[in-house]
Amino acid sequence: MTAKLSVNLNAVAMLRNRRDLPWPSVTGMGRIALDAGAAGLTVHPRPDQRHIRFSDLGDIRALIDDEFPGAEFNIEGFPTEHFLDLVEKYEPEQVTLVPDDPTQSTSDHGWDFETKADFLTPIVARLKKRAIRVSLFADPDPKGLAAAKATGADRIELYTGPYGATYDSAKAAAEELRKLGAAADAALALGLDVNAGHDLTVENIPPLAKRIPALAEVSIGHGLTADAMEHGMAVTIRRFLKALEATP
Ligand SMILES: CC(=O)[C@@H](O)[C@H](O)COP(=O)(O)O
Ligand SMILES: NCC(=O)COP(=O)(O)O
């Protein structure tokens, strides 16, 4: 099974927000991603709207509905009442619940399922009542996965940040991969499907996908956006040089 790719648009939105101008366009980049074969788009709206703005959500929903029916919208975040209202308004195909504090610069850990089960269970039920698939952000640790399953969630998303951080050490990467594989095996045995995300790249995806052949989906923003910039830069330089040539 080939894992689906959901493109996280947070990094594009962060770049856009540097100016009061509409580029790079979040929906424009989403359109390019879906047109090129991505299976879906991911956003992680944070309370301070430092990258994805709440107003982006309707635009992305409309892009998928109008131009890419069958693609999936995945909204990630901590389930405050405001977050749940947004989710109920824009009806993503998948919600990924993440235990982020509003002050966090990025996501850096999964849920403690055993202590948070009472909090998560009614939220999962509320989302599933709207036919939204629910995924729970999880550390690569089999402990607590039975409690995750008991919340009624469909999937976990394995937090791959520590794996992504091993880009300069094959030994450390092998150890992180071992943990991710063990957690995925435990989740699959419990009947939970497995997504993965955070700091994934073209380099670190193949060993992950080989170790977890049942991987359902990866969501990628930072590394993918960096890759797009690197591989698009030469084309852009040529476009700007041509624009200069047109100057009298
Ligand atoms: C849950 C996860 O790993 C990503 O959504 C990550 O949180 C992206 O958010 P930022 O773009 O704010 O870093
Ligand atoms: N759900 C994880 C995700 O979207 C990863 O984002 P990034 O770390 O690749 O920016």
Image: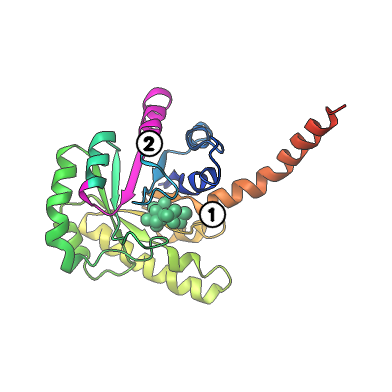
Q: CA distance from mark 1 to mark 2?
A: 25 Å
**Residue picked out by circle 2:** 55
Q: Quadrant of ligand 1?
A: bottom left
Q: Residue at x 25, y 34 (%)?
A: 89
From what the image shows, is residue 69 above or below residue 94? above
Front-most of 191 and 196? Answer: 196
Most distant residue in the front direction: 20
Q: Quadrant of residue 169?
A: bottom right
Q: Which contiguous range is marked in magenta?
A: 55-81
- Is 72 a magenta residue? yes
Where residue 10 appears, x then y in whole percent? 45, 48
Q: Residues within 10 Å of mark 1 (few under 14, many from 20)?
A: some
Q: Relative to the observer, which residue lies in front, 182 or 9?
A: 9
Q: How many marks?
A: 2
Q: Which residue is mark 1?
A: 223
Task: Give the residue at x 18% y 57%.
Answer: 149
User: What x and y, as percent, mark residue 115?
Assistant: 16, 68
Q: Is residue 61 visible?
A: yes
Q: Is 224 in the magenta?
A: no
Q: Amino acid at mark 2?
A: Ser
Q: Position of residue 171 (x, y in %)?
A: 52, 76
Say what amino acid the circle numbered 1 marks: Gly
